[in-house]
């Protein structure tokens, strides 16, 4: 165990977490564990252009699932995180969600990037460094 109470120590850990739709809420548990075990100090949320989750709305998915499967998902998932409407807004939402989570220490830097799949370029959209407030 390290001085900071972590189980493992790595010089600069890289701990990728990939989830369908790229939404932070689905990655939160893995982020919390990665930070605890490996001392992750930077979290980068990346959404990409032409994402499949931008092809529907949360309400549309809930309605379709109810019609097709006979199940109501309206209380199962945070509706703000089911689909991607505006990429900038969803990145801002996800960074705020992580920053406000008790599972993400205040000392962690959080960034939101947009990856353009047509140009292969990343654009910084949101920056919430530790102590930045």
Image: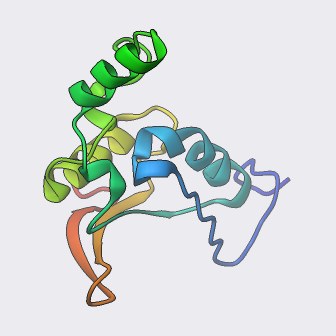
Q: Quadrant of residue 110?
A: bottom left
Looking at the picture, tell me which residue is in the foreground, 127 or 84.
84
Residue at screen point 59% across, 43% down: 32
Tell me if 93 is positioned left or right of 17 in this view: left
Q: Residue furthest right?
A: 1
Point out residue 62 in the picture as x, y percentages from the top left corner.
Answer: 32, 22
Point out residue 95 in the picture as x, y percentages from the top left corner.
Answer: 30, 50
Above or below for 41 versus 72: below
Q: Residue furthest front?
A: 68
Above or below for 115 versus 21: below
Residue at screen point 63% across, 77% down: 12
Point out residue 30 in the picture as x, y percentages from the top left corner.
Answer: 62, 46
What coloring was used for the rendering?
rainbow
Q: Quadrant of residue 113?
A: bottom left
Residue at screen point 33% across, 88% down: 120
Looking at the picture, tell me which residue is in the foreground, 125 or 110.
125
Q: Quadrant of residue 49?
A: bottom left
Above or below for 19 versus 103: below
Point out residue 18 in the picture as x, y percentages from the top left corner.
Answer: 55, 58
Residue at screen point 41% across, 23% down: 77
Looking at the picture, tell me which residue is in the foreground, 80 or 9.
80
Tell me if 32 is positioned left or right of 117 in this view: right
Task: Say how many tags the image has.
Answer: 0
């Amino acid at each position: 165990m390290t001085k900071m109470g972590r189980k493992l120590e790595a010089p600069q850990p890289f701990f990728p977490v990939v989830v369908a739709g790229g939404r932070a809420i689905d990655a939160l548990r893995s982020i919390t564990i990665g930070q605890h075990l490996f001392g992750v100090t930077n979290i980068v949320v990346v959404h990409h252009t032409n994402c499949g989750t931008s092809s529907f709305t949360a309400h549309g998915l809930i309605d379709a699932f109810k019609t097709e499967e006979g199940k109501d998902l309206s209380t199962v998932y945070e509706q703000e995180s089911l689909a991607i409407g505006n990429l900038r807004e969803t990145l801002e939402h996800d960074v705020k969600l992580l920053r406000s989570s008790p599972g993400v220490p205040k000392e962690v830097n959080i960034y939101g990037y947009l990856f353009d799949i047509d140009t292969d370029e990343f654009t910084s959209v949101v920056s919430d460094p530790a102590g930045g407030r």
